[in-house]
């Protein structure tokens, strides 16, 4: 068992932040596993060039080895040694969205990264996080940092340092605690099709609508919306993700019909003696009577819902919920990422009423 250090950096000023991060940065540089906050969720970082270090990420998370990792950088100049020449569109997207929650899949330079990072693909997903603590840590570590979400594989991603410890205490070297993350859902992962096309492999913090302003042909890859196909373009698409321990069902349709359906299901489950949970928008919260009713905020503010989602899924576990129903939202803007994560958390059990 490893001792997991916790470095609390909340409210640390510039210089103070640097000194609070120096031990975490040193450990990263020397092959350690360090969880850190980003504007999306907490990541579990390791030196992306070191196979020994990256191998520990897969072991600590219990992550399937064919699911590649995203590499995090602090400066554009780090890119040249990691990737081969890329389309002009990629540079334009970096100008526009970096630092930020956009992962761009680019052709990897042979030998630049541990082969575990790319899971044998000829490409690598790279992003620059928009978070002062993440950037300061990356600068001090001085290496490209491979970092998936800092949860046990399959579980909801961590939006607080406490969530990281819940899953990984004793399995990693440390966690930098800077309080809650921003967006609350992972980055958007995209692949480019020459200089005009953008395919969204995983919806996230940068929306389809925002990408369409940069490239009108931008579209969400169908495999990220529906049942994953046999050979998904992004390996992570085929795994169950973000799931609470109870069985979750996502319910879509006219809001009144959705509320009536869910409450009926809850009552039937309670008759069977099951512990029930409901995840709903503020507008209809009072309609539900279950063992654990949690709010995603107003359906007029899906950004707030994104921020709340993973903590709520973990709270159902704390309440011992065995059957959970969630209201679907619109799929516009950040709603696309929210529905993608809920559908995965539900193992694609989606009921249309
Ligand atoms: P996570 O690190 O848990 O946020 O997951 C990273 C996601 O990015 C997974 O869905 C991966 O399959 C996807 N991904 C990472 N690298 C690539 C790549 N080179 N090509 C396609 N998808 C990738
Ligand atoms: Mg993840």
Image: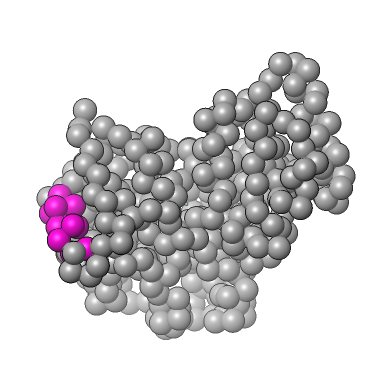
Where is 330 relative to 172, above or below?
A: below
State the residue at coordinates (82%, 44%): 258
Locate residue 307 relative to residue 107 in the image: left or right.
right
Residue 238 seen anywhere in this rendered image of the structure: no
Residue 212: percent from the left, percent from the top? 60, 77
Where is 139 relative to 310, above or below?
A: below
State the residue at coordinates (75%, 16%): 272
Whether the magenta-drawn stretch holds residue 11 is answered as: no
State the residue at coordinates (45%, 66%): 101
Residue 186: percent from the left, percent from the top? 48, 56
State the residue at coordinates (49%, 77%): 194
In the picture, which quadrant includes the C terminus?
Answer: top right
Residue 129 seen anywhere in this rendered image of the structure: yes
In the picture, which quadrant includes the N terminus?
Answer: top left
Residue bounds of the magenta highlight: 17-29
Q: How is the image coloured?
A: one colour
Locate residue 89 relative to residue 287 in the image: left or right.
left
The overriding secondary structure of the stretch rendered in magenta is helix
Whether the magenta-drawn stretch holds residue 27 is answered as: yes
Where is 125 relative to 293, above or below?
A: below
Residue 331: percent from the left, percent from the top? 69, 60
């Amino acid at each position: 068992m490893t001792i997991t250090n916790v470095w609390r950096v909340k409210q640390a000023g510039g210089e103070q932040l640097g000194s609070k991060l120096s031990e975490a940065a040193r450990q990263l540089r020397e092959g350690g596993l360090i969880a850190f906050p980003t504007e999306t969720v907490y990541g579990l970082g390791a030196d992306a060039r070191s196979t020994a270090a990256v191998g520990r990420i897969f072991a600590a998370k219990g992550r399937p080895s064919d699911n590649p990792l995203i590499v995090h950088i602090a400066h554009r100049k780090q890119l040249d040694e990691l990737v081969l020449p890329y389309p002009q569109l990629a540079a334009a997207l970096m100008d526009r969205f970096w630092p930020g929650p956009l992962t761009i899949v680019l052709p990897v330079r042979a030998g630049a990264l541990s082969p575990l990072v790319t899971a044998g693909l000829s490409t690598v997903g790279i992003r620059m996080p928009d978070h002062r603590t993440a950037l300061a840590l990356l600068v001090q570590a001085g290496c490209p940092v491979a970092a998936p979400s800092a949860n046990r594989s399959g579980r909801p991603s961590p939006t607080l340092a406490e969530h990281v410890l819940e899953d990984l205490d004793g399995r990693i070297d440390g966690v930098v605690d800077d309080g809650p993350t921003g967006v609350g859902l992972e980055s958007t992962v995209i692949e480019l099709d020459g200089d005009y096309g953008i395919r969204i492999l995983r919806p996230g913090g940068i929306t389809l609508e925002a990408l369409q302003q940069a490239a009108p042909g931008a579209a969400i890859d169908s495999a990220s919306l529906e049942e994953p196909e046999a050979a998904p373009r992004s390996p992570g698409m085929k795994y169950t993700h973000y799931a609470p321990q109870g069985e979750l069902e996502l319910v879509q349709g006219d809001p009144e019909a959705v509320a009536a359906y869910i409450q009926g299901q809850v009552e039937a489950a309670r008759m069977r003696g099951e512990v029930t949970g409901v995840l709903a928008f503020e507008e209809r919260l009072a309609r539900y009577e279950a063992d654990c009713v949690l709010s995603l905020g107003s359906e007029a503010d899906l950004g707030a819902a994104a921020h709340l989602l993973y903590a709520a899924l973990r709270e159902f576990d704390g309440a011992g919920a065995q059957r959970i129903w969630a209201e679907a939202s619109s799929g516009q803007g950040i709603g696309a990422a929210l529905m993608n994560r809920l559908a995965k958390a539900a193992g694609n059990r989606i009921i249309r009423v």
